[in-house]
Image (cartoon, grey):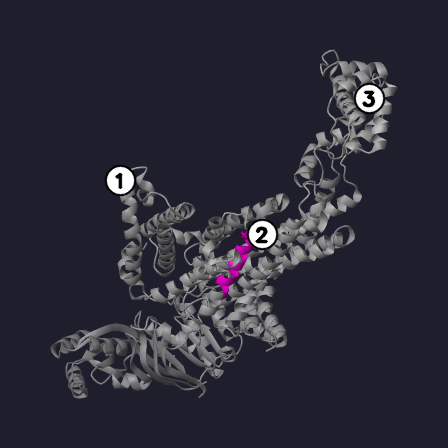
Amino acid sequence: MRIELRDLGKTYDGERWAVRGLTLTIPSGSIVGLIGPNGAGKSTTLRMLSTVLGPSEGSITFDGQAPGADKTALRRQIGFLGDGNPLYKHMSPVEYLRFFGQCFKLAPDVLEPAIEDMLTVFDLRDKRDTPSGALSKGMRQRLLIARCLLHGPRLLILDEPADGLDPRGRSDLRTILSQTRARGVTVLISSHILRELDDLCDQMAILQQGKLVVAGDVADIIQRYDVRRFVYQLRLLGGAPAAREVLARRRALIEGEGFEDGCETLSIQVQGGEELMADILADLVGAGVRVVTVSRVRSRLEDVYNRISEDRVA
Amino acid sequence: MPLSRQLHAASLPFVTRALRGGRKLRYCGAALLLAVLSVVIGCWLALGSGPLEHELRVNFKLERPMHLQQEQNFKIFADNPIELELLQAATREFGTTGTLHRIAKSNRDFDTYSYHERQIAQRIHDGLDLVARAGYARNNISPEMRAAAKAFIDRHGLQQFADRRTEDYWDIDGSEKRLSIMLARDLVPEVTIYRSSLDAVDAVRVTGLVAGSFAMLLLMLFAPVLAGTQMAQEVHENTLQPLTGTALSARQLVLGMTLGPAAVIALLAAPQLLLFLATAAAVGHIVPALGMVAVCLASGAFLTMLAQLAGLALGRQRSSGMLGVSLLALLAPLTLLGAVFALELPGRLVGMMALVPQAAASHMLLESFVPGAMRSNSVDVSELATAQMAVIIGALGMLCFAWLGLRALERRVGELAPTALSRGEALLGALVSIVLITIANPYTPSNYQPEFYLINFGMLLVPLAILLMMRVPMAETPTALRRVPIGPLMAEFTAGIALHFAVCIACMGGFSQLKIIESPVALAYLAWTITVAGLLTLRVAALPMGLLAKVWAGVCAISLGVAFVHSGQWTSNPHRDLADVLGFWEVSPLLGVLQAVMLVVIPVMLLRALRNPASTTPTEG
């Protein structure tokens, strides 16, 4: 489902705007990350996209169609997980999924196989009859996402889905979202944990104080905001102390050290362009440091976000 | 989409959820158990011979008290077989002319008799009194009975005792029947162990009453409590939010959340209703029985919507359990009060059934098996007709309120509009309230007029305040930025009250009957009451209520009551001394000054808070 937001705005009191002037295009079948600090307007935007909240100005179109007065047909194509992640503690996963399936008006011959499918995909088969209150946090989160996907939506909206998940749960979430994308579902996800979105999202949009700061393809944005930052990783077979001396002399910042595949590794940030790095490399070789590889480390989403935030503060 | 399909789509998830797993079976089992319990309780209550059963039957007007039965049927009830034998043995000593003479001469001094003999002697003495009166009564007695009594007197030579009695009246209900029993038994009372005066048909009748009572409790007490509690739980645990994003419309969602708990109640109530209707058809009156079901459904729907609105409004701050207990504490006494009201049916107040649905349902329940004329406290026919009218109009009013409740819930749940009710809907609600209150306390020319229009005004303030609360915009706006349209809302509130006075004038047949206009002080107090009631309602609905704000609202409410009473006093006596304008001045000049200050400060403070909501923020939490 392709979604277009045109000058979208929402105010609750007619004076202060939670979101304003939001123009964004979300391509069909992509995963789009919505990033921003608390109060940036992410949840408001997602609620408007899920049609549970009407915009004060601007418009949203879904596959070129504006939602009509009766939004129920459109809602059958949207899966929305809001913040708070509420569950009925006394209902088992099967009962919970059946309840929501009926709320989405799925026919029984469609609903029951869909429930089984979700239980399999989200690895909840063994817990199908366990009360939800007795499930682990990760399982509960999986059940909530399963609920959002049960009716086969073409748009999945997840507000902070990784909140409270352990590393394993986050990894599972990434897998599930990749599988969902593979089904052709457009995914819109907001998160504070930017590393979760880094290698997952195709597109991202950064919101601050209700305004869109930057939006577009993740790789393009990183590239755009990466020009002033040069981080390299060195793999050394020997001569690490000498390397540290050279780097200190050249005022290169060592960001991290490690050991990988029998080689010592150094992550360094240089205050200059690629020419400076070529000079540093020559010095290292000259000082007897046995350099195996030098590779440039691309910035991560988190770095870009921090950079943008710094820019705005400045 | 057709209504039936809409209802099916709305109810399916919630009914499935309510009856999931083994719940359906458990509820069915409980329903059958309840039905069996109804039969057992009904039979026990109707046929039981114990003092508790008798007491209950007397309280429910199904049987006369034991002492009246003994008196009317010329009987003595023994408590047990041993006492029965002793009394029967004692009875054998009486019945002769000699014993009759001795008793007649005794002047009720039976010290020489044994305990059991004394009981019999007293009863015979009562009988002698009646026979003597009958023999010489000139009015209201059939000649045959007079002749029979005279013959008894002559046969036993009791003329001298009869002559002593100069009364010649005969006007006690049922005396003739009592006399015939006494004469038939030759003035020797029957001694027997007490048995219920009700028979098997009565037992079926009482079983129907019990089943109907259970059904009424389920529909009018437990259904609202369950629905309100569930709504509060959805709000409290934030599970309502995901539901609003499903394919169900706001109306379907509200209907579903009503029908889910209703399905549980329906399962429990179905056997009770069947039992009730079947017994009413067999040994009672089916039309009032159907009327009772209709009243229960209409009122149950209204109370359910009201409870759900309470759950929606309070669920975020209060737990569902607390709300459930509060609803029970509010509705259970009303149910009890309704039952007592229907049993006593207090004359001029029968119209209150329009306002108190519990009383209306209880009345129809009684009418199904023990119509007014059959009750031990036989009821006036015109009162019964008024009661029936009040019940019908009340049920229609409840249906109207239920619809308004549905609209309000729909808007609140779906966040479809800033206000819960539109202006037209609020006006309809006000109109229905006015009609119901006017029926509850109708105008009769013999009544003192201010009692009519001022008391009705006082009663009307409550529904009008609730309607006004539903007209306050409730968007998720920070307190400091809230704008309450005070003028338009106060105008709507005042229009409702003006409508009430217009109806009162129409009922009284003219403006001149409105005595309040003769006293400017009464009018001023009335205007103050209306203004402060409106402003206070807006303050409570629109702005946060911290502890201080709650105390202040309490002070305002008490002042409202004081002003209302002053208005009434000045209406009843418009020519009072001007020094009495401040009622508290008589108690103490200091209190009088305080009253004067409050009259100015209260509206000013309320208005200030509403115009500048930010000023109320420090009192939050």
Chain of the residue where label 1 is placed in the rendered structure: B
CB-based contact (under 8 Å), mark 1 and mark 3? no
The residues bearing labels 1 and 3 have C-alpha atoms spaced at a distance of 76 Å
Is-magenta flag for residue B407? no
Is residue B160 visible in the rendered structure shown here? yes
SS assignment at label 3: helix
Q: Position of residue B340 (x, y in %)?
A: 60, 44
Between marks 2 and 1, how big is the CA–CA gap? Answer: 43 Å
Query: Which portion, as a residue range, is magenta?
Result: B428-443
Label 2 to label 3, Cα distance in Å?
52 Å
The residue at 31%/56% (across/down) is B606
- The answer to whether residue A44 is left or right of residue B181 is left
Q: Earlier in the sequence, mark 2 or mark 1?
A: 2
The answer to which of marks 1 and 3 sits earlier in the sequence is 3
Q: Which mark is residue B351?
A: 2
Query: Which disc number belongs to residue B88?
Result: 3
Occupied quadrant, residue A250: bottom left
The verdict on a common chain for dots 1 and 3 is: yes
Marks 1 and 3: which is nearer the front?
Answer: 1
Respond whether the residues carrying marks 2 and 1 are from the same subunit: yes
> Callout 1: helix, strand or loop?
helix
Q: Quadrant of the C terminus of chain B?
A: bottom left
Q: Which residue is mark 1?
A: B590
Q: Which residue does the image show at 54% across and 74% down from the upper left?
A: A104
Sequence order check: which comes first, mark 2 or mark 3?
3
Which percent across, then down, holds residue B81? Answer: 79, 25
Looking at numbered disc 1 in the image, what kind of residue is underneath it?
Answer: Leu
Q: Amino acid at mark 2?
A: Gly
Amino acid type, label 3: Gln
Snapshot quadrant of residue B163: top right
Q: Crowding at label 1, few (<14), some or many (≥20) Cα neighbours within 10 Å?
A: few
Q: Tell me, yes or no, whether dots 2 and 3 are on the same chain.
A: yes
